[in-house]
Amino acid sequence: MRGPRRDVRLPLAVAAMLVMWASAFAAIRSALPTFSPGALALLRFLFSSATLGALSAARGLPRPERRDLPTILSLGVLGITIYHLCLNYGSQTVTAGAASLLISSAPMITALLARLLLKEALGRWAWAGIFLGFGGIALITLGEGRELRVEPGALVILLAAVAASLYSVLQKKHVGRYPALAFTTYVVWAGTIPMLVFLPELFAALGTAPAGAILAVAYLGAFPGGLAYVLWVYGLSRTTASRLSSFLYLSPVLAIGIAWIWLREVPSWLSLVGGLVTIAGVALANLRGRPLSRPSA
């Protein structure tokens, strides 16, 4: 007699999301010599807005309620505008692998914020992981300088991780009100609007941009900046914020491999040590031995 068939949709969605987001770090680094950080973010999310708009139009896009507009705008500014501008500016001086290692601290920060804002429980191992993870972040920040010093770009990327964590936790309270695709579309559109201030820079860069750089940004917009966000909201509607975020600690491993193949780029040894410490902290802070499933009511 066969047992119940296991639903593999959520694990597959998480795996696809991880690969897309891991590849984004190398794609950003490859496009930055052509585009300024602001122009790159704007072009990326113009592609993303168009991709999500087309998908939403095909499936029907429910109109957002007026009371939800401030929340959608706030989430767009946090998760799209601030996060991606900080990531792009920091990536000018930080390797793709080290950037992914710093962003991997987001699950740890999310767990802390989820405890404060969503009242999700944190045990003593989780607190130990948070302190360990912040020690790893310090090593990465030092390791990305040419000398043993704090790298400002690393601090900017850390700010991106904080913005991503706030986005994850605050989003959890609202994802159930709209379908994943519709909610993601509205948030991306809301986050793209403030970036329009970079439109003159974008027009100037497009005049001389090689096709490869434009294709890299198109990929960033359609997949890491579009479909991956839909998969994130899909996963968030089926598990806790801290549990889903814990899977992001696998992203640096993928990102370093992709950056090595694409850019021949590897973080410094101190950054790698710091990354291992951060990932260990994330694992302690988030992995509680529960299966990836819909949380109980």
Image (cartoon, rainbow, N blue to C red):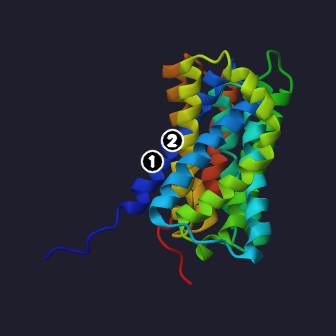
Where in the figure is residue 62, as x and y percent of width and height?
A: 58, 71
Q: Is residue 185 left or right of residue 262?
A: right
The amino acid at mark 1 is Ala
Helix, strand or loop at disc 2? helix
Where in the figure is residue 9, as x and y percent of width and height?
A: 38, 61
Helix, strand or loop at disc 1? helix
Q: CA distance from mark 1 to mark 2?
A: 6 Å
Where in the figure is residue 152, as x and y percent of width and height?
A: 85, 29
Establish if 125 lies above or below 100: below
The residue lying at 68 percent from left, 60 percent from top is 168
The C terminus lies in quadrant: bottom right
Question: To which quarter of the image does residue 141 belong?
Answer: top right
Question: To which quarter of the image does residue 288 belong?
Answer: bottom right
Label 2 environment density (alpha carbons within 10 Å; few <14, some 14–19, many ≥20) = many
- Residue 16, label in figure: 1
The N terminus lies in quadrant: bottom left
Question: Which residue lies under the disc numbered 2?
Answer: 20
